Image (cartoon, rainbow, N blue to C red):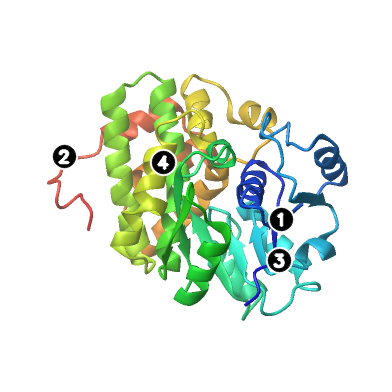
Amino acid sequence: MSLQRISVLGAGAWGTALAISIAQKGDKVCLWSRRTELAAKLTGERENKTYLPGIPFPETLEVTHDLKSAVDADIILNVTPAQHLRQNLEQLRQFLKEDVPLIICSKGVESQTGNLMSEVMETSLPGQPYAILSGPNFASEVARGLPSATTLATQDEQLGLSLAKAIGKSTFRPYVTTDVIGAQMGGAIKNVLAIACGIVAGANLGENARAALITRGMAEILRLGEKMGGRAETLMGLSGLGDLVLTCSSTSSRNFSLGEALGRGEKLQDILERRVTVTEGVHTAAALSKLSADLKIEMPICQAVHKLLNGGATVTEMVEELLARPFRDEKLAGFD
């Protein structure tokens, strides 16, 4: 398989960071922007001042608004937000060669269907080779070349190894797995848990409470992830535990910072209106609530966040509900 030209679809923070990281190796990379004006701005300024200010584009990175041109590549990284992935894949169909692998870089659950990104991919472009990229990666650090590791999941291990070689480098290390489900579940659920940890910080509930939430949140990831068919070792790896720890501990996380604002008493709509980036946990909370109910999986933290975001509950009510849960044996309440 020829791996000469790589395209990244989506010129937000993460898409831009991936494009910069790959282009820093000297590879020819095309970054596609949905918006014509943004593509022109990025081309002229040679940096993404909105999402990654101060990080210049390598010479080998080009920007385009022409989707047909962007899709003419050997590898495509699709960094479309989870709730728009299906629509984007429909647009790609008319241009995409059937043997070109897509790396899906979105984290979340489709709110309308409850589908994982792999399921959206398989129903939208059946037979197209694909992989899932998910891990504890802040865009700005990847773009600046700071050491990072991530999970690259695909059912075809040889394809995974080829893709890892194409997009990886010493400071951005993809670890390959065939556990496509497990790699997605951690990244989707941790977004909701990060909102909960942000609320703890914003409401000044203390570090003990945050540690408890992270630990009990990991139990929720394992319960639902394994029920969906994911493997425990994947869920305890970079795309699960690693991503959970990162996003539940830093204001650089969009989900954590949203939760922190909620914990301080700000209204959800006001927070979202002033943001230029997508906060996936807001959309995923409702989908996870329904999914866990359908599968009869106990996920009290995710359920509480859903009630806060979508059910009219207050922060105080959310905290009181979690604290009122009965005492249980840790093993019975634990990671099984």
N-terminal of the two: label 2 or label 3? Answer: 3
Cα separation between marks 3 and 1:
20 Å
Q: Is the Cβ of the residue at disc 3 closer than 8 Å to that at disc 1?
A: no
* Closer to us: 324 or 226: 226
Q: Residue at x 61, y 49 (%)?
A: 18
> Within 10 Å of the Cα at label 2, are there few (<14), some (14-19), or many (20+) other Cα atoms?
few
* Closer to us: 243 or 162: 162
Cα separation between marks 4 and 2:
21 Å
Q: Is residue 1 left or right of residue 303?
A: right
Circle 4: element type: helix
Q: Which is in the foreground here, disc 3 or disc 1? A: 1
N-terminal of the two: label 4 or label 3? Answer: 3
Q: Which is in the foreground here, disc 4 or disc 1? A: 1
Pointer 2 residue: 327
Pointer 4 residue: 193
Checking the image for residue 29, the label placed there is: 1
Return the x and y of residue 188 as percentages of the image width and height. Answer: 48, 52
Q: Is the Cβ of the residue at disc 4 closer than 8 Å to that at disc 3?
A: no
Q: Is residue 53 left or right of residue 65?
A: left
Which kind of residue does numbered mark 1 sit on? Val
Pointer 3 residue: 89
Which kind of residue does numbered mark 2 sit on? Phe
